Image (spheres, rainbow, N blue to C red):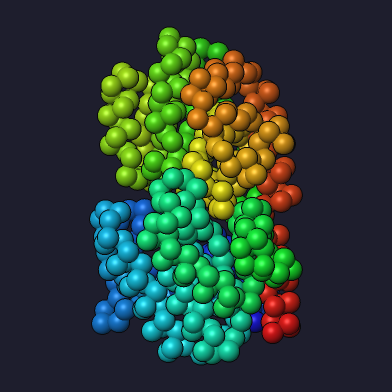
Amino acid sequence: MIVWIVNHYAVTPGFPGGTRHYELARELAEVGHEIIVFAAGFNFSTFTETQQYGTRHWEKEVIGKVDWYWIRTIPYKRNDWRRFVNMISFAKRSGKLARQLNKPDLIIGSTVHPFTPLYMSRFAQKQNIPFVFEIRDLWPQTLIDNGSWSKAHPLARFFDKIERKTVYRSSGIVALSPKTPGYLLKKYHFAADKILVLPNGTNTSKPVVNKITTNENIPLKLMYLGGIDKVHRLDDLMKAIHSLGELQNRVVVELVGSGKEVQNLKNLANRYNLENITWSKAIPKSKVAEKLMEADVLFLSTGEVFYGSENKLAEYLNAAKPILTYTPATHNDPVEKTGCGLSAAFGDVDDLALKIKMFSETDAETRLQMGRKGHRYAAENLSWHKLAGELEIFLEKLLYDS
C-alpha cells in the first residue's frame, strides 16, 4: 500500500509532542508499505519553527523508510485567532503538496483540529481513493462536553457541519477512544465494521525500575509530564498538596512540560507557599522514558475529554511506575482495573489529597508491584508493533472493499 498520513501536529522523537504517527508509519514501512507523512514544521509545544524551507512551503526528510514532509505554516504565539490561521495554512498547503505527489492508495487525515481531515477528504474524493478519518478529538462535541460551547454556539454549528462532511466522505474511521464508535453510530449511523479503535501506544521493553524511593525519610516523588493547560486541572493538584498541611513534606512534585498555565500555577504555588514543587521544561519524546524513571509515582490528570486517548498514559504504563489518575474519563482508565495505581474522584480535591497520602505511606515493594502490573498491561495491549498490525489489517480491508 501507498499510504499518506496527514497530521498537523505529528512529530518525530527529537521534538516535544506525540509520536503516534511516526511510530505507526515506521512499523508499516518496515513490513513493506510506502508511507508518506505530512506534518507542520512549527512545533506547537514550543511555538518555534523547527525547519528551514528555502523558497518552498515544505521540506522533505527521509526518516528510515518513511518520507516525511515538514510543511511551513503561519506561526503564532498565543492560543487566539492566529492559531486558526496556522491551522488553515497547514490544511491548504498540505492540499497543494498533495497535488504534486504521486497518487496514493489511501489517505489518513487526523485531527485534533478538523480542517486537515476536511481538506484531505475532499482531495481523496476527487481522486477517487479511500479516505480514513482519524478522530483524536471531536470538534465540537468535546468543547460542548467540557462547557466551552453550547450546542447553539455559532462555532459549534460551524464545526458540526465540517465533521458531518468529513464523516460522510470517509471510507473508514480510526478512533482513539472506545466511546467514539457509539457517538458515530448514534449521530451518523456509521457502520461499526468501518471503525477501528486504536489507542495511543508505546515502545514496550523490559521494565527498568531505578531511583525508587525506599528510605522513609526521603519524600515521595510525584511527577506529571505533559501539556500544562487548564484541561489537566493541575491547580487541583496544587490545592491537594496544600491541604496535606505538614504531611506535604513527605511529597515532592515535579511538573515537566510547557503550556499556557505554567505562570498561573507558579503564582498559585507561591500563594500556597509550596516549596516542594519543581518545574521542568518540555523535553523531546526520545527523552521521556528516561525522565519517567526519576519518579516514584506518575500523575495523570485530564478534564472532561471523552473522545481521545492520552499519549502519556501508555508511556506511564510502560515506565513500570505506579500511576495516580484524576480524570472523569474512566473508560480510558486501566489503573483501577489492573491494580497498577490509584484513582482519585475527579473534582474532589480532598480525595486527591487522600490518594497522595496513601501513596506516601505505601512501601516501595508494593509500588514496584503496581508498576509491573501497568507495564504488563502496556506490553499486552499498547505496543506500537501490535497496534500497527491492527491498522494494517483495517486499511487493507478498506482497500479490498473499495
The spot of residue 82 in percent (x, y) is 26, 62
Q: Is residue 172 visible?
A: yes
Q: Is residue 293 visible?
A: no
Query: Which residue does the image show at 48% across and 78% down from the upper left?
Result: 120
The spot of residue 265 in percent (x, y) is 33, 32
Screen quadrant of the N terminus: bottom right
Q: Is residue 57 left or right of residue 340?
A: left
* Viewer-proximal residue among 189 and 199: 189
Q: Please, is residue 125 above or below residue 293 in the view?
A: below
Query: Which residue does the image show at 32% across and 64% down from the upper left?
Result: 84
Q: Please, is residue 267 above or below residue 200 in the view?
A: above
Q: Please, is residue 204 above or below residue 101 in the view?
A: above
* Viewer-proximal residue among 164 and 27: 164
Name the residue at the front extreme: 152
Screen quadrant of the C terminus: bottom right
The spot of residue 343 in percent (x, y) is 61, 30
* Viewer-proximal residue among 154 and 401: 154
The spot of residue 144 in percent (x, y) is 47, 51
Query: Which residue does the image show at 51% across and 58% down from the upper left?
Result: 138
Q: Quadrant of residue 27?
A: bottom right
Q: Quadrant of residue 275?
A: top left
Q: Quadrant of residue 267?
A: top left
Give the number of marks. Answer: 0
Query: Which residue does the image show at 60% across and 47% down from the upper left?
Result: 314
* Viewer-proximal residue among 359 and 219: 359
Name the residue at the top extreme: 246
Q: Please, is residue 280 above or below residue 20 in the view?
A: above
